[in-house]
Image: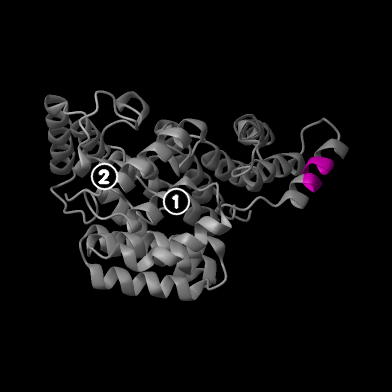
Amino acid sequence: MREVRGGVVNRPLVGLLREALDALPASDSPLRARLLARLSLELTFSDDTELVEPISREAVELARRLGDAASLGGALRARWMAVWGPDGLEERSALAEETLRLAQATGDQEMELSGRTRRVATSLQSGDTRMVEADITACARLADELPMPFHQWTATTMRAMWALLQGSLDEAETLAEQARSLQPDGPNAFFAYNDQLEMLRWVQGRPHELRQAWRDQVAQFPRFVYARVWVSLADTEPGEAATTRSLLQFLADELPNRPRDGLWPPAVAVAAVVAAPARFGCRRSPLPGPAAVPNPGYRRHDAHPVMCFGSASFYLGLLATVTARWAEAGDHFEARDRRQRAAGGQAVAGPDPL
């Protein structure tokens, strides 16, 4: 099953999938399960995101009833994307493990690669860095055994992410460039490359260098709040109150109306980094409060794990400083430190300076 193309809604294909489902008998069949899974994926970035959850669930339940491994593998991938976001870590972890068990039972290496990439994502979220490293190594091996550019790109982007988390900036940039060369025309490769390069330039104090690239992305995908936040960050000097207020107001208006998918937490994280230095001292923060932000310890990343912002506790702490909730901020920063120690004290390069 082809992965969803970031930000793209293939409307003719969505129409064809719906026509095909309407034409099929209502009885269970592998074809029906595959069509449902594909439709769920294609609706990921559409205006009909409320349909993704029930359609993906139906695809998984149908494929499980049939016992058809190929249909179930595709349905599990679609379901994983349906619950991609700040919530649902337990279900995503279970889906990744089920995918791996299915791959091992059938000897399907592509399915194994898919399962391991998803377990990298869930391990990042739970802070299990040892599992992250082990699965990235396994993905690199699988990509060598499956000499296809897409698989090699998948493995190389994750290696670049891991190098960045280790603070190996030169290696991370080299790998990011290498990954981009493997998929020069792929929209997902474009997003991944920009994400990794932006993180690198942020760590290096040079985010303004990618201003035009992010402006181009906003022009192409105006619904992507995340891209607009990066543009604002590149345009904003630290502590520049007027521009910062404008960015935060935009986020306060937009975030409540956006799906809580995998693009939501990074937007909040970057906003927290912008907001904290300004310290407006307002009694009520314009950003979502702690109840709306992922649980402390959540590791931010894209559906295909290409970047990690660090612990959610760090950003919750920053948001608490915006409204001078110092005790609460201290608790979050201490929780971040505990997470780091539990992960073996591993240094993480990025906005969250672990």
Q: How is the image coloured?
A: one colour
* Relative to 22, residue 291 above or below: above
The structure residue drawn at horizontal position 26% and vertical position 33%, both measured from the top left corner, is 296
Please tell me which residue lies in front, 93 or 72: 93
Secondary structure under badge 1?
A: helix
Secondary structure under badge 2?
A: helix
The structure residue drawn at horizontal position 47% and vertical position 46%, both measured from the top left corner, is 225
Please tell me which residue lies in front, 317 or 220: 220
Task: Judge left or right: residue 173 versus residue 20.
Answer: left
* Neighbourhood count class around disc 1 (C-alpha, 10 Å): few under 14, some 14–19, many 20 upward: many
* Relative to 158, residue 148 above or below: below
Disc 2 marks which amino acid?
Ala
Q: Nearer the viewer, mark 1 or mark 2?
A: 2
Image quadrant of residue 77?
top right
* Residue 190 drawn at (x, y percent): 49, 65
Image quadrant of residue 141?
bottom left
Q: Would residue 270 be visible to someone looking at this image?
A: yes
The disc at residue 228 is 1
Residue that badge 2 annotates: 241
Task: Judge left or right: residue 125 versus residue 19.
Answer: left
Please tell me which residue lies in front, 170 or 67: 170
Disc 1 marks which amino acid?
Arg
Image quadrant of residue 159?
bottom left
* Relative to 254, residue 140 above or below: below
Does the stretch in magenta take in 286?
A: no
* Residue 1 drawn at (x, y percent): 63, 53
Q: Would residue 142 be visible to someone looking at this image?
A: no
Classified by dominant secondary structure, the portion drawn in magenta counts as helix
Structural distance between the alpha carbons of marks 1 and 2: 18 Å
Counting residues from the start of the chain, the first of labels 1 and 2 encountered is 1
The residue range painted magenta reads 15-20
Task: Judge left or right: residue 268 versus residue 261.
Answer: left
